[in-house]
Image: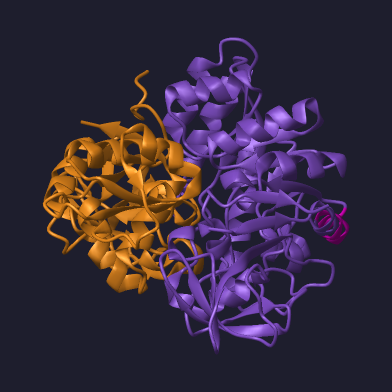
Amino acid sequence: MSAELRISRARLAANIATVRARVAPADVLVVVKDNAYGHGVETVAAVAVEAGIGWMGAIDLRSALRAKAQAGDRARVFCWLTLSQQETRDALAAGLELGVGDALYLERIAELATGAPAIVHLKIDTGLHRNGVRPEHWPAFVGRAAELERAGRIRVAGIWSHISEASDADDDAARAAFDAAVGAARDAGLDPEVRHLAASAAGWARAEFRYELVRFGAFVYGVRSADGPDLEGIAPAATLVARVTAVGADQVEIGIGSLDGLPSTLGGRVAVGTPSGPRELVRIGPGSSVVAAWPGVAVGDEVAVFGPGASGESSATTLAEAIGTVGEEPVLRVSPLIPRVLVD
Amino acid sequence: MTWPNPRRAAPLARISHSALLANARTLAVDPAVVVDLRRDAWGHGIDVVAAAAAEAGIRFAHADPRDADAVARVGLESVATAPTGGERLYGLPGSGGTPALVLTAPVLSIKPLLAGEGVSYGYTHRAAADTRVALISGGYAEGVVRGLGNRASVELSGGLRPIIGRVAMDVCVIDIADAPAEPGDEAVYFGSGLVRDALADWASATGLTPAELVCAVGLHVEREVVA
């Protein structure tokens, strides 16, 4: 195993600047879930805070806690998994804000918040049917939230949801449901500071989905939407690099394989970047893979599996499209054992 | 107020020492066998797997350089020879071994899903009739492959429950119909009971090998060693 995942902080900062300019005056929440999409929470949180980003968020508690530890009072950090009791205590003690899409979870948070009120973001189910309170249960939910807020147990900082991106019409229907839910929350006496509905794709493309805050994950890391266009000012921040470990007549072996998180189904379907430009990724074994050779190849030469294209490699999204998935998946599958190396 | 989630909200991989030991004993009948401990023992954890291999009487191991000390500590000899029998050691489907990794996740919440309503990104599943759905943790960030949506099931409350709609990065939705489930109950993706060999279904649904599937899970989720 000779591989490494190279992270460009300058590229992260440039992507953040691009999405901020795109959605202003709305604010950007930088999503750092799952170890910042495998890029390293501390790295990404430091870049975000340095850029003046005031919001970060993660579904998983571990990433959220690490982001908060990195940012301190310079950013608000939002965690939206339905947590266990001890996890909720830890989250509140660290000053995290909690995403709440379940009435029982709201009660449990309120019970634990014995000091300062727990800061929560209430989630309406606008059609995705994952977490989120269904519209028919929403009036009772926000009524109870208003009671708990008056009692000093919680403070409702936000109303939020996720959209399906099944079609623009579906998303418009979700947005109408969202607006109705915000109206019902205000009628119940709540006064949320922020509404957040959109993630990268809709936040980028559709102004009416931005409200006060847009959650950007994929585009911060430069992961293009599957079947979507390349975007001006957005490029991959990570390059997955492996080295040549053996040289044959027409093919070479590189030191990365399917046990390192490279999906074996990519074999024969995509190209990787080499010192001579793109070459076919012929076959993926457990611990190593085979690439078509190039003139003058030597052991130790670097091959880029995915990245911004500096040596002819494809983006993670282009690889993903070859096997019917989204660019986030090959990025997230990269083994945690592969070192993350900062290049700038 | 009772809290439903037993301990944690994220998925958990349980690594069975007894399964590893039993599997290793069947490999140890060949005194020259070289066990495959690459990549933190295929995501099962180098320490528990190396110890089980040594206890079973295996002498040789092929591991990553970073794990050389862990291999030497239990008395195994590191060799560069190509390893064999990984599928059997880790109990992957069809190997004749007992699964050494059980992937579990708690139910986070339960709610109704009405006829015609869609689920998850792209609404790739719509309910044929009114039903109940559970959100469980586990998504493609944890190696629960995105392509498993509408193609695999988990075990919960004694039955198989299909994953409906797209698997997201950290969660997925299962159809539980009228099963007596509650938040905090444990769903099992693979490795025991009705889903003992579900990795075979994962492999046929995704085209990926059982080895890379289990390794990605083991490397990305928290692990707990059980007897």
B220 or A275: which is nearer to us?
A275
How far from the left and from the top, in percent, is residue A10?
84, 55
Q: Residue at x 56, y 16 (%)?
A: A113
Q: Is residue A87 above or below residue B99?
A: above
Task: State which region is magenta.
Answer: A16-24
- The verdict on residue B58 being magenta is no
How far from the left and from the top, in percent, is residue B227?
20, 31
Chain depicted in purple: A
Q: Residue furthest top?
A: A115
Would residue A248 appear left or right of A195 to someone viewing this image? left
Q: Residue at x 53, y 71 (%)?
A: A166
A305 or A96: which is nearer to us?
A305
Displayed quadrant of residue A158:
top right
Query: Principal SS element in the magenta part?
Result: helix
For the question of whether residue A164 can be seen, the reply is no
Q: Is residue A226 above or below residue B158?
A: below
How far from the left and from the top, in percent, is residue A69?
69, 28
For the question of whether residue A221 can be seen, the reply is yes
| Colour setup of the view | by chain
In the picture, the quarter occupied by the N terminus of chain B is top left
- Number of numbered discs visible in the structure rendering: 0
Chain depicted in orange: B
Displayed quadrant of residue A319:
bottom right
How far from the left and from the top, in percent, is residue B147?
40, 68
Q: Residue at x 61, y 10 (%)?
A: A115
